Amino acid sequence: MRAEAQQYIDRIDAALDLLRRFLDWDRALRRLDELNARVEDPTLWDNAKLAQEVMRERTRLESAIGATRAIEGGKTDNAELIEMAEAEGDEEMVNEAIASLKALADQADEDKIKALLAGEADASDTYLEIHAGAGGTESQDWAEILSRMYRRWAERRGYKVELVDYQAGETAGIKSATFLIKGENAYGYAKTESGVHRLVRISPYDSAARRHTSFSSVWVYPVIDDNIDIEVKESDLKIDTYRASGAGGQHVNTTDSAVRITHVPSGIIVASQNDRSQHKNRATAMNMLKARLYEAELRKREEAANTDYQAKTEIGWGHQIRSYVLQPYQLVKDLRTGVTSTAPDDVLDGALDPFMAAALSQKVTGESVDVEDVD
């Protein structure tokens, strides 16, 4: 078997293994048999709501099991075809089968990610907060670079991005920013980005052209819909109003339209200044607060799948999830999964999917990787 073909087969096998583990394969097969039997029972349709739930679950399992079997069958058929073609010296057939294996490997990776995005809130829109760490202009500039990176990532996926809150840096960059990202599975993908991000570069603000290390944190939480009831006591809230900063219209810095809400029991702080109306900004901030409280509850319930997940900690050394080195060499390294890129410009332009896919896979496998940070 040629090395190229074996490489694609190994990719397919890895994806199929993860899919089976995610589905709990034997249990999924038994469950599908149970659901098929229930659908054959005419009394099921006496309860329309229950029948719809059964049909949705059955369709989901049929699709996942069928896709997995189709990829496995295609892998076997093409592997056998390559062996036969090599024995006959048919180079054209070998190349066609290798091309088919590549397409199957790509499909297996895509199906794997779709399966991993099956959490309770994964399909939701998401809020994404960025906060500069200590270090003044350096970290504030890094926070702005991160904000552009996530906007570009969202644009690549066809998502819509809205700026909810913005605090400009004193000299350059931003102190913080909150974005609302709208699109299918926006939270499911972006949730893997929560944590501290580290940048190493020659500072454009240092006349001596020395290397600087900067930190910023990212915090991701899902937008919740009206079906999710989160109770928030008014007595638990501290509400402040202030003048908005940054782009937003001629009223900016002239009216106290921006709203900041502090949830005293949890210490969660949210803010909104995107609208001209203080009333609308307060409503947005309340929705953000409820989303943060919901996300905190999700983390408690999914603790087993998120053992490596950290709540907000010090934005500095020892807490980073990913390092971005621009000088003296170029490397981006994820310290949870070991995934690297030698093209940081591409990563900072939104090429984040390989990092997200690896982090999602790790949540299913529970496998930790011993990764050393880069200098």
Image (cartoon, rainbow, N blue to C red):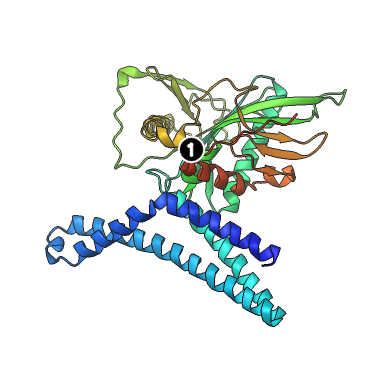
Tell me which corner region of the image, top left, top right, bottom left or bottom right, holds residue 195: top right
> Is the C terminus in the top left, top right, bottom left or bottom right quadrant?
top right
- The spot of residue 14 in percent (x, y) is 55, 54
Residue in the foreground of this view, choosing between 361 and 312: 361
| Residue 184 can be seen, yes or no | no
Q: Which residue is mark 1?
A: 127
Q: Residue at x 20, y 59 (%)?
A: 51
Q: Which residue occupies 60% across, 44% down? A: 355
Residue in the image at 65% along x and 19% along y:
134
Rendered position, 38 above or below 161: below
Q: Quadrant of the N terminus?
A: bottom right
Place of residue 208 in the rendered image (x, y in percent of width and height, measured from the top left): 88, 23
Residue 98, quarter of picture: bottom right
Q: Above or below — where is 65 with respect to 135? A: below
At horizontal 39% and vertical 35% (from top left) the residue drawn is 302
* 23 w.r.t. 4: above or below: above
**Left or right: where does residue 120 sit relative to residue 36?**
right
Give the amino acid type for the residue marked by disc 1 in the picture.
Tyr
- Find the residue positioned furthest to the right: 208
- Name the residue nearer the viewer: 117 or 252: 117
Circle 1 SS class: strand
Left or right of residue 140, residue 275 in this image: left
Counting the numbered discs, the total is 1
- Tell me residue 57's x, y (percent): 30, 57
Q: Residue furthest front?
A: 87
- Residue 191 visible in this rendered orientation of the protein: yes
- Residue 88, horizontal then vertical, whole percent: 68, 82
Closer to the camera in the image, 67 or 73 = 73
Q: Quadrant of residue 203?
A: top right
Q: Residues within 10 Å of mark 1 (few under 14, many from 20)?
A: many
**Depth check, front residue: 263 or 251:** 263
